[in-house]
Image (cartoon, rainbow, N blue to C red):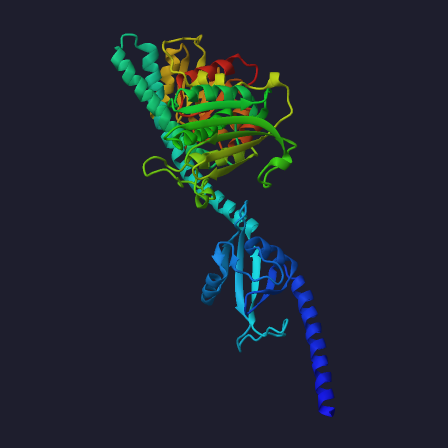
């Protein structure tokens, strides 16, 4: 009798102790930053902190007391078997948008790791720890992408100077032949046309690579997106086969943004071409532009703006596999067949949009199509002060058909270290009725300016030169109060270069490779202005 009472008392004390330990354990795991759950031998959830309850409901549909049959796409049997190899396992949620988790299981029924308390009379089972690493993985992916972009950009910046000098000499000499030689046969003119256009195409490829190295746009101005979008769609419609229907939808308005029109045109064209290629059997290409609010953006790692413009490019093509979506904007990644794509187009789109303080996203369904959305911040300005980018781009790219000599024998000092480019620019300017003096670097230019014979009206200087570069030359010219107008040319203007030139009140730039029209327009504008 006495022993029975003692046994009952002991059992009651042990049950109270177990309950106390259980409550203490529940309070403890509730403070963990990760999801922590205890499962019995039948994989039923017997204890879980709030995060684990939410994660398990998302990954397996199981609540407290329910058996866990799977974690995401992985069956619980496969997960338990894989845990023997040690380490965390990746688990993907099945809902949309998809989230990424890491999970690890620890056995609680071994001698080395015994269960510290009896949970609901179940002495065996295991502990499951789950953590949501979606944001962490996305951040790491963005860092990795930026690193790849920077590496490609450094390579591009390294070759851009020499490459664009080569293209400049080809284009300028070709333009000069067009303008001065009237007796060239039609066949020879066609050959010259091919040379000029291929040279421009080659320079465009370098511009794509250079886009990866720019941390910000260097020719920002307030532009109207409506004429840009309408003209691009009109031009692209000519390139579409008959079995692809093109639809443009936009609300009335000017959609003013601060940006570089040539870069935005390039980004949109890349998306149009991808959409076309995704519909080999035909379909519909839809382009839509509208305004949206900050809350509608898919990403939050951007500068805050109240109002945004979104351009959506949608196709009804083959779609993109889910495992490829997260890699779309990586350089040299492509879903196209070998030889059909270099894997640079979407990377360029991504970088251009980021330079414009915007963001870009992609949604796709295999067999149904893909939608790319470009979000750009709206600026508050009057439409009359904004640039129509389409007309400006066409005027510069046009190949001159005949000689137009606007010069009045003004004197121009050409400062260029590349002898062939220096000769090409000099010959072109002389053909346009300008007097030309040439120098191979900044020091030689200063020496010419100090001589009485070198009274110049305009200085056309390269940016990167040995001994004394363009910025150093401009600095000296400002110190000496030289009255001549100044134009700086380069294949690549970094943000730092642009800021230094602006600090010297120099705003006339020419991007290499040089063309006759762009050079002529820049010189006429500079000579007619009241600024240096």
Q: Is residue 26 above or below residue 477?
A: below
Q: Is residue 304 in sight in this rendering?
A: no
From the viewer's side, name the closer residue of 204 and 368.
Answer: 368
The spot of residue 213 in percent (x, y) is 47, 37
* Left or right of 120, for residue 318: left
**How many callouts does the rendering have?**
0
Q: Is residue 517 above or below residue 90?
A: above
* Left or right of 296, for residue 205: left
Q: Is residue 395 in sight in this rendering?
A: yes
From the viewer's side, name the closer residue of 525 and 171.
Answer: 171
Res 467 quadrant in image: top left
Q: Quadrant of the C terminus?
A: top right
Q: Is residue 242 above or below residue 16?
A: above
* Left or right of 281, for residue 225: right
The spot of residue 503 in percent (x, y) is 58, 28
**Residue at the spot 36% in from the left edge and 26% down from the top edge:** 201
Res 440 quadrant in image: top left
Residue extending farthest bottom: 2
The spot of residue 271 in percent (x, y) is 45, 31
From the viewer's side, name the closer residue of 358 and 459.
Answer: 358
**Residue at the spot 34% in from the left edge and 20% down from the top edge:** 196
The spot of residue 509 in percent (x, y) is 49, 23
Q: Is residue 363 above or below residue 182?
A: below
Res 1 quadrant in image: bottom right
**Residue at the spot 45% in from the left edge and 63% down from the top edge:** 82
């Amino acid at each position: 009798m006495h022993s029975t009472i003692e046994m009952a008392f002991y059992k009651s004390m042990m049950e109270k102790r177990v309950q106390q330990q259980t409550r203490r354990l529940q309070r403890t795991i509730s403070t963990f930053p990760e999801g922590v759950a205890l499962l019995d031998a039948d994989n039923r959830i017997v204890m879980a902190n709030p995060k684990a309850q939410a994660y398990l409901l998302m990954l397996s549909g199981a609540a407290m007391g329910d058996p866990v049959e799977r974690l995401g796409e992985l069956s619980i049997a496969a997960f338990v078997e894989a845990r023997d190899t040690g380490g965390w396992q990746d688990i993907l949620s099945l809902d949309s948008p998809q989230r990424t988790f890491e999970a690890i299981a620890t056995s609680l029924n071994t001698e080395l790791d015994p269960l510290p308390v009896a949970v609901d009379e179940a002495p065996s089972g295991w502990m499951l720890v789950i953590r949501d690493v979606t944001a962490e993985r996305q951040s790491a992916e963005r860092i990795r992408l930026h690193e790849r972009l920077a590496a490609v950009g450094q390579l591009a910046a390294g070759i851009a100077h020499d490459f664009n000098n080569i293209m400049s000499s080809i284009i300028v000499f070709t333009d000069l032949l067009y303008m001065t030689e009237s007796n060239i046969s039609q066949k020879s003119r066609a050959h010259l046309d091919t040379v000029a256009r291929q040279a421009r195409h080659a320079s465009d490829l370098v511009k794509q690579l250079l886009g990866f190295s720019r941390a910000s746009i260097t020719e920002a101005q307030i532009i109207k997106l409506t004429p840009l979008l309408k003209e691009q769609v009109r031009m692209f419609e000519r390139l579409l086969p008959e079995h692809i229907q093109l639809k443009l939808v936009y609300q009335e308005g000017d959609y003013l943004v601060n940006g570089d029109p040539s870069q935005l045109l390039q980004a949109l064209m890349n998306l149009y071409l991808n959409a076309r290629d995704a519909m080999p059997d035909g379909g519909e290409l839809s382009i839509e532009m509208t305004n949206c609010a900050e809350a509608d953006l898919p990403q939050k790692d951007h500068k805050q703006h109240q109002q945004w413009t979104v351009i959506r490019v949608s196709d009804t093509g083959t779609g993109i596999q889910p495992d490829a979506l997260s890699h779309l904007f990586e350089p040299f990644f492509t879903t196209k067949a070998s030889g059909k794509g270099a894997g640079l187009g979407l990377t360029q789109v991504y970088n251009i949009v980021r330079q414009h303080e915007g963001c870009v996203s992609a949604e796709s369904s295999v067999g149904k199509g893909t939608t790319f959305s470009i979000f750009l911040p709206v600026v508050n300005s009057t439409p009359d002060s904004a640039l129509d980018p389409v007309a400006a781009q066409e005027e510069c790219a046009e190949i001159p058909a005949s000689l137009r000599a606007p010069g009045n024998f003004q004197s121009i000092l050409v400062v260029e270290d590349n002898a062939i480019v220096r000769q090409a620019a000099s010959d072109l300017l002389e053909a346009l009725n300008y007097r030309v003096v040439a120098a191979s670097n900044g020091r030689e230019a200063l020496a010419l300016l100090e001589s009485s014979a070198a009274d110049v009206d305009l200085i056309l200087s390269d940016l990167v030169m040995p001994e004394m570069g363009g910025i150093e030359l401009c600095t000296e010219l400002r110190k000496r109060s030289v009255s001549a107008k100044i134009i700086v040319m380069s294949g690549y203007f970094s943000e730092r270069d642009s800021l230094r030139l602006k600090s010297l009140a120099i705003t006339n730039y020419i991007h290499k490779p040089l063309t006759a029209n762009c050079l002529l327009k820049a010189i006429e504008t500079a000579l007619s202005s009241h600024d240096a």
